[in-house]
Image: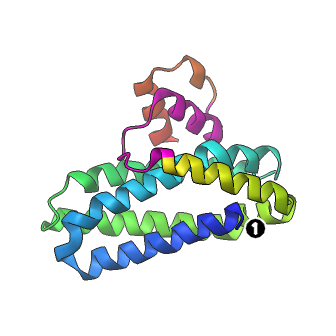
């Protein structure tokens, strides 16, 4: 299995979780943290292992910068969703926004970034990335939105093409990523 397949498998799992969250409100207290943790781990693994390679080796600079911005937007929404009462209309509104945001991101990533990687990188490199992606994803599984370290925020800023990030505080990085 290569990294593109792994990423797409995660996308399908997230879509399955979205369906459960929409259609089985009673499962929301249990599934919301699961969905948030999966998305955060997936995003961190892409940001640390996949996006830098996609930029440098596959020439996907603009697409990666855009994808990184979408990750920041989704994480902000996920943080709000995780705090919302699963029985409230606010939860429903936030869930719809998360689904819209993540679905849009998945469609773009599967149309642009992933095909570019598959065409520009050989199968050995894609397999190496799969191992790194899996290890990073496992390391971050269980983390919730808003818990990124300063180092992770710096990587996100590099992925997003934000200049001057190395001199920013954690709070400044978070703000720059959310406003990019």
The number of numbered badges drawn on the structure is: 1
The extreme top residue here reads: 167
Check disc 1 and report the residue beneath it: 115
Q: Is residue 161 magenta?
A: yes
10, above or below 56, in the image: below
In the rendered structure, the answer to whether residue 133 lies left or right of residue 145 reads: right
User: Residue 30 at what x, y percent from top left?
Assistant: 23, 65
Query: Looking at the image, can residue 36 be seen?
Result: yes
Q: In which quarter of the image is residue 82?
A: bottom left
167, above or below 173, in the image: above
Residue in the foreground of this view, choosing between 6 and 112: 6
In the rendered structure, the answer to whether residue 58 lies left or right of residue 63 reads: right
* Residue under the image location 35 percent in, 53 percent down: 77
Q: What element carries label 1?
A: helix
Residue in the foreground of this view, choosing between 57 and 176: 57
Question: Mark 1, residues whose alpha carbon is within 10 Å: few (<14), some, or many (≥20)?
Answer: some
Residue in the foreground of this view, choosing between 178 and 122: 122
User: Residue 97 at what x, y percent from top left?
Assistant: 35, 64
Colouring rule applied to residues: rainbow
User: Residue 43 at what x, y percent from top left?
Assistant: 52, 51
In the rendered structure, the answer to whether residue 146 lies left or right of residue 66 reads: left
* Residue under the image location 36 percent in, 41 percent down: 146
Query: Looking at the image, can residue 67 be seen?
Result: no
User: Residue 140 at what x, y percent from top left?
Assistant: 46, 45
* Residue under the image location 51 percent in, 20 percent down: 168
User: Which region is colored magenta?
Assistant: 139-162
Q: Does the magenta stretch include residue 3?
A: no
In the rendered structure, the answer to whether residue 79 lies left or right of residue 173 reads: left
* Residue under the image location 52 percent in, 34 percent down: 152
Q: In which quadrant of the rendered image does the N terminus lie?
A: bottom right
């Amino acid at each position: 299995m290569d990294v593109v397949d792994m990423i797409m498998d995660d996308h399908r799992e997230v879509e399955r979780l979205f369906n459960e969250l929409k259609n089985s409100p009673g499962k929301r207290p249990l599934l919301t943290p699961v969905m948030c943790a999966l998305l955060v781990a997936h995003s961190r693994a892409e940001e640390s292992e996949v996006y830098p390679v996609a930029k440098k080796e596959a020439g996907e600079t603009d697409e990666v910068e855009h994808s990184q911005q979408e990750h920041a937007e989704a994480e902000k929404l996920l943080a709000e969703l995780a705090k919302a009462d699963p029985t409230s209309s606010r939860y429903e509104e936030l869930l719809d926004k998360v689904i819209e945001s993540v679905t849009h991101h998945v469609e773009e990533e599967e149309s642009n970034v992933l095909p570019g990687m598959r065409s520009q990188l050989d199968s050995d490199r894609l397999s190496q990335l799969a191992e790194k992606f899996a290890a990073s994803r496992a390391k971050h599984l269980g983390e919730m939105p808003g818990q990124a370290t300063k180092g992770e925020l710096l990587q996100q800023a590099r992925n997003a093409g934000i200049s001057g990030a190395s001199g920013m505080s954690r709070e400044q990085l978070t703000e720059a990523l959310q406003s990019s």
